[in-house]
Each structure stands twice: as C-alpha cells, then as structure tokens.
C-alpha cells in the first residue's frame, strides 16, 4: 500500500511512540530502584535542631564604699586624734577586699531553674517530634507531635543512641519517650 508522507497511518505513530514510552518506563524504574537502594532522605531521623545556649544574668555585687578615718582636734590636749570610720550597713564585709562577682545558687524548685525532672511539665520545641515506644531512635513511633504540645514527664531520663530520652505522657494519655533535644521546660 502506498500513501503520501503527510498521510501517515496510525501504526506509524505507534512505531514512534512505543519506544519512547518504553524508554521513559525504564528510566522511571531505574530511578525508583536507585532511590530504594540509596535510601529515602525523608525517612531518615532528623538531625537535632541547633539549640541556643542558656545565658544567665549575674548581678555583680555592689562595691562597698570605704570611709577613711578623719582627724578631729582634741580641744583639751590641742592635738589631732583620729576617729573611727563610720560603720557601714554591710556587716562582715572586709573594706579592703575587692568586690567579687558571686553566682547565685540554684533555687530548690527545678521548674524555676529550667530543669526537667520527674513530674515536671514540658513542651515540644519543634514540629514533627516523634513519640517513641522505647528510648531509642529505632523505637517504634507511637505518635508525631506538633510544636508547643504540653507533656508530663513520668520518670527519669535515659541515655541511648547519643540522645537523652525522657518518658512522657501526652494530654491524650499516650505514653512514650521523647529526645531531650526536642522538649523544653514549660513556661
């Protein structure tokens, strides 16, 4: 059968299209295989977020003003007699010692110092925080928590897989472990 080149038969289009479709399928299959072989970056454990260093403001001790002894004329003898310096309001302070900066001791209340302890309330400080059934990065994910979820600490900290893990309970009653990098004491 003969026909003009501008009048192509439908089978001619298939001879062109099928190898292209087959090539695209092979490239897609190779892409999928390579992604499975290398690993999906979305399924890996996220790196801990950068944390800010806690900086405490330390009030410097107020310097003590030292009053030097003054001389008073003794009228009876006509001589100068030194007088004792005026007393200061700070008992037990050595007037010759240089002022020192002292760090205040931490308060007895761990909540006031920003520490996490058993029974304290904490909040998540990132989106997508994994609540796990065991204190490990290989523990099964029980729930994925969003930012600012209040949790109650139910036990003591455990160290595993380069993380500090706290056992917590969600407001819904679910219990599990959260890495300390992803929680902070509740305000």
Image (cartoon, rainbow, N blue to C red):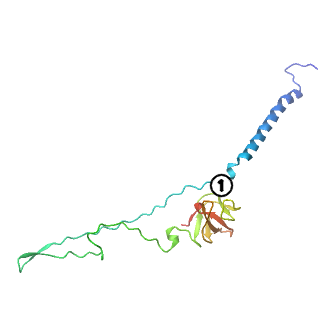
User: Looking at the rendering, which quadrant does residue 9 occupy?
Assistant: top right
Tell me the residue at 61%/54% (across/down).
47
Using the image, determine if residue 102 lies above or below residue 51: below
- Label 1's element? loop
Using the image, determine if residue 163 lies above or below residue 82: above
Using the image, determine if residue 90 lies above or below residue 46: below
Would you say 7 lies left or right of 174 here? right
Residue 127: where, in percent of width, then height?
Answer: 62, 57
Query: Considering depth in this image, is 134 or 89 the residue closer to the camera?
Result: 134
Tell me the residue at 67%/53% (across/down).
44
Tell me the residue at 52%/71% (across/down).
110
Q: Circle 1: is it few (<14), some (14-19), or many (20+) Cα within 10 Å? A: few
User: Looking at the rendering, which quadrant does residue 12 occupy?
Assistant: top right
Using the image, determine if residue 39 lies above or below residue 13: below
Labels in figure, total: 1
Would you say 31 lies left or right of 177 here? right
What residue sits right under mark 1 in the picture? 45
Residue 136: where, in percent of width, then height?
Answer: 66, 62
Residue 119: where, in percent of width, then height?
Answer: 59, 73
Residue 173: where, in percent of width, then height?
Answer: 68, 70
């Amino acid at each position: 059968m003969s026909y003009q080149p501008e009048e192509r038969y439908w089978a001619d289009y298939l001879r062109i299209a099928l190898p292209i479709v087959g090539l695209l399928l092979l490239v897609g299959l190779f892409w999928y295989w390579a992604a499975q072989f290398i690993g999906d970056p979305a399924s890996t454990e996220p790196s801990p977020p950068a944390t800010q260093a806690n900086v405490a403001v330390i009030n410097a001790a107020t310097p003590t003003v030292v009053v030097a002894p003054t001389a008073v004329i003794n009228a009876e003898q006509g001589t100068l007699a030194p007088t004792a310096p005026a007393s200061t309001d700070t008992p037990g302070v050595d007037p010759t010692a240089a002022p020192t900066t002292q760090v205040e001791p931490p308060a007895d209340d761990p909540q006031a110092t920003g520490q996490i302890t058993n029974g304290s309330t904490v909040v998540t400080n990132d989106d997508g925080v994994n609540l796990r059934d065991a204190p490990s990065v290989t523990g099964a994910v029980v729930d994925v928590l969003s930012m600012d979820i209040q949790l109650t600490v139910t036990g003591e900290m455990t160290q595993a897989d380069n993380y500090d893990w706290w056992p917590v309970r969600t407001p819904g009653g679910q219990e599990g472990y959260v890495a300390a990098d992803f929680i902070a004491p509740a305000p």
